[in-house]
Amino acid sequence: MRYIPVTEKDRKEMLIRCKADNIEQLFSSIPDDVRLKRPLNLPDAKSEMELIKYMQTIAAKNSNTGNYACFLGAGAYDHYIPSVIGHLVSRQEFFTAYTPYQPEISQGTLTAIFEYQTMICELTGMDVSNASMYDGASALAEACVISSSASRKKSEIIIVEDMHPEYRETAETYLKFRGIKHASMTVEQLLSADLTNTAGVCIQYPSFYGDIYDMDRIGKYVKENGSLLIVCANPVALALLKSPKDFGADFVVGEGQPLGMPLGFGGPYLGFFACVKEHMRKMPGRIVGKTTDVDGKTAYVLTLQAREQHIRREKATSNICSNQALCALMATIYLSVTGKEGFKQVAKRCVDNAHYVYEGLLKTGKFEKVSDLPFFHEFTVKPKEDITALNAYLFKYGFIGGHKTEKGWLVAVTEKRTKEEMDEFIKRAGEFNG
């Protein structure tokens, strides 16, 4: 049952425990002159069935990805979410759980976090992962700070221009108020830049505009110049693309929302953070470790969590001392139920759908190429019509259009889009005359 009412007998027993004759006595400490002298202005009570129907009627007025085909991405994506995720994360032992400082009573939560860390390491190719961050932007910013402090001789951070603008702004804010020099440049500028004083280079993989750069070339140049490489990756793309480990990444961070999390108006989401072993002890937040108890049985505990993060404020390596455990659990369940092959199939379907829409839009003659680089499930084209007007037109036909950027129209296509939806989207986009 959703709701178990308190009986009159229950009320009497509670009043006896409170040593009160009636409910009014429980509020005797509130002065009479501040009490409301009239009944609350509330509508008549509804039954549960009536209330649910009423709320559904109100909710139906909203536009959402349940009744609109979504081609909007730019950092948050409309992927299919297996129903098992909602069932499991709604269980009270997960939904109401607090920080697992006491391992004796938190083995379930700690085990789930350990499995999450393991999966993130397998996905990124890194040696170690933390228990998660607040979001992709904060994960990137923390990696920049660690990179800057890793060398006494180098401190500057370079952020490649095609980084998500909100991620870049977050990182620059962190760096600015820590007095860390930072610069922004294109990939072409990076590959000819003097990295003598550069501690770390940040690049998005694929880029915010969808491009997939020659990461082997970039990684080689960065490593030859003695700088650290920070890769901000799309986790679904990592199912098909070369592992960041293979081209020399020291940190791999990103947004975990595509791994089973809904489009919740910007959150709560999940920032994943992984790195090579060398930087493990400077990693922000917490890490769950595997050990054995006094009886020799497998046990899980919080480990390598620097207490300075709680008490030293500005002197700390990081002031983040929490994590998104429930969202990390959602990602863990998602990766578990899709499995390695299923996850690859999701990514492959995204690639196929995106390229189908891309080619279809170009064939209409209403869109121009912006880049010749390969892409995953997101691409930028330049419409001949106004983008805002185009999106408004598409919305009338049940489509949430792409994101307007300074380079053009950023369109995302996930595995959820059917051929019928894609064909209709291409048709309506091609026939629009602003």
Image: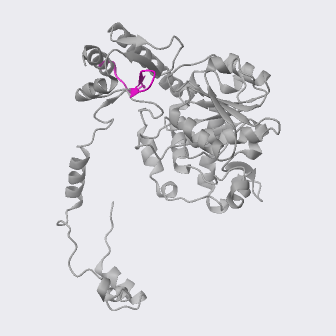
Q: Quadrant of the N terminus?
A: bottom left
49 up-or-down from 141: above or below: below
**Residue 283 is a magenta residue:** no
Q: Position of residue 343 (x, y in %)?
A: 52, 28
Q: Is residue 272 visible?
A: no
Q: Position of residue 230 (x, y in %)?
A: 67, 32
Q: Quadrant of the C terminus?
A: top left
Q: Nearer the viewer, residue 426 or 408?
A: 408
The region drawn magenta spans 403-420
Q: Position of residue 191 (x, y in %)?
A: 69, 18
Q: Is 428 positioned to the left or the right of 305 in the image? A: left
The residue sitting at 45% across, 21% down in the picture is 407
Q: Is 66 positioned to the left or the right of 252 in the image? A: left
Location of residue 31 by image quarter: bottom left
**Residue 415 is a magenta residue:** yes
The residue sitting at 50% across, 22% down in the picture is 210
Q: Nearer the viewer, residue 224 or 156?
A: 156
Q: Is residue 397 visible?
A: yes
Location of residue 274 by image quarter: top right
250 up-or-down from 418: above or below: below
Toward the left, the furthest residue is: 44
